[in-house]
Image: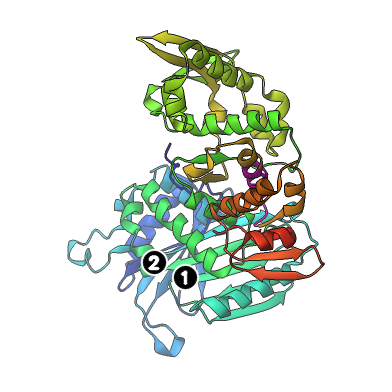
Amino acid sequence: MKQNKLSFESENLQVDYLTFNIQGTADFDLINRIAKYLFQHFAFNSIISDCSKNKKHLFFSDKNRHQVEFAVYLRAPELNSFWDGTQIRFSGKNSTRFYQLIQQQKINWYLFKTQNFKLAKSKKLTLNRVDLCYSKTKKDIDTTQSFESFLNSCSEKILQNSRTKYIQYNRNKKGFILKAGSRKSPNYYRVYENNQEIRFELEMKHSRVQSVQDFLFNGQISEFEQILTKHFYNHSNKILVLDQLYTDWLIKYLRRKEKQDAGFLLPFFKQNSLSLSDTKKVFGLLQFLSFIRTIPFQTFETIILQHQPYYGITFPLKDFAKFLGEEDKYKNYGDRYRRKKYIQFFTNLQHIKPLITAFSDQKFQSSVALPTLSIDKINLDWVVQLSIAKELYLYDYPFILNNSSIIYKNTYELQIKYKILQNFSVNDLKKTLDVQMLLNSFNASQKRHADNKIEIIRQLNQLPIQKQYKLHLKNGKTKTVDKLTPLLIGKTQFILFYEKL
């Protein structure tokens, strides 16, 4: 199942400033025509300004709540003006409203062009600036870590890793603010606070937006938003430190960016303990949910059960056995045992509700439902027919790992795999694994104990994590290594490691 396209709405991004340029000596007939059009059709008041910042109204009604400004520039070096042209400006809520009209394809761009055929090429309308902003409500932030400390960390990251050396960091009446980049450059980034919000804002200008302006003017809004949304996130990643309090939205995007279309699906876990029997059932649910993502969506049937949407899914039982790495076993099972074994597997899924508290996301918990199930022999092969909640199938998993995580060979490997995945599948980028608690949970022989250490290393090596481990040893000391060995595992109480984005 392919990931949905990025859009401003899907990523909670807001257009906060828009400007358009018309090159050349001001055409006041054109300015008045545009102003009148926006006033009559969309209730925009309008003002006109010059290089000296003198302003006057063109069209005005005290009933209107939005405004557009026409800034007329004349080449006058003594006034610090080096361009002839007109800039059409929409700021703040005005830009949000105007962009909504663009999305709805209500803007007639033809009216923004000069009617003088000879001047048409020289007075071409161009997109000059787009500001995108992500806002995070302060009440959602645990203030144990100060905003000032976060900005300090961002400043250090910029100086160490980025070519951007223009940094301003200060405090105004509303709070702290960080500015990165030159105001004249195609990318200028701001992070600042007001009374209610933390705002992350990227000002994109000139070549950065002109490269995508044809999508905007031609009504290809999804392509326009896809490109600028990716650019917003990628530039944010250059400026901001990955911090669970302030940049959880960026972490979520980076996780999604790295996800494959198919693999082993993982929701967020709670850190609770399960019996071996229950571990098999919960792991079985994740195996099944990962398997159905490999079935062509076109074969699904949409059905309604008790006023809720479900997908009816049909597949050969041998395909599921192959997915679990049990193809040879499946062939060797007796026909009766084969059916009994897998009926028990899917029956467990139908009665798994008491165990879904293993997962921390309530949305995921509430969507787990497989109300109908049958396994019948059709044309000499067993075929499974079941229904699954639409919401569960479409759930946006935070992690999709490679297929090697799906299969386990024995119960020792299962329990080690499950515990490591449980510790990995948390929202925080920092992960903790209590090695001794895991090893001591087995009543195993010395050889099995040694094999379990090797298995812990193997499972960790399969995860998308930074290959640097901070070991808290049993003797109270700490040690940082980039490679684990069974000897080190035996000496370690718990390991700290970080997710790789």
Dot 2 and dot 1 residues touching (CB under 8 Å): yes
Q: Which mark is residue 89?
A: none
Instruction: Pick the residue in front: 54 or 414.
Output: 414
Residue type pointed to by label 1: Asn
Q: Position of residue 17 (x, y in %)?
A: 51, 61
How many numbered discs, if any?
Answer: 2
Give the left or right position of residue 215, taking residue 383 as reference. left
Q: Is residue 453 visible?
A: yes
Q: Residue furthest front?
A: 446
Q: Quadrant of the C terminus?
A: bottom right
Residue 169 sits above or below residue 336 on the image: below
Instruction: Pick the residue in front: 204 or 237.
Output: 237
Q: Position of residue 321 (x, y in %)?
A: 46, 26
Q: Is residue 300 visible?
A: no
Q: Position of residue 376 (x, y in %)?
A: 46, 9
Residue 38 sits above or below residue 169 on the image: above
- Residue for badge 2: 208
Q: Main secondary structure of the magenta part?
A: helix
* Earlier sequence position, callout 2 versus callout 1: 1
Q: Is residue 383 magenta?
A: no
Which residues fall within the magenta stretch? 416-429
Q: Is residue 425 magenta?
A: yes
Residue type pointed to by label 2: Arg
Instruction: Pick the residue in front: 393 or 379.
Output: 379
Q: Which mark is residue 187?
A: 1
Q: Quadrant of residue 297?
A: top left
Q: Quadrant of the N terminus?
A: top left
Instruction: Pick the residue in front: 247 or 335.
Output: 335
Q: Position of residue 166 (x, y in %)?
A: 54, 81
Residue at image x 37%, y 66%?
A: 21
Instruction: Determine whether the residue tagged by mark 2 lies in a helix, strand or loop.
Output: helix
Q: Residue furthest bottom?
A: 78
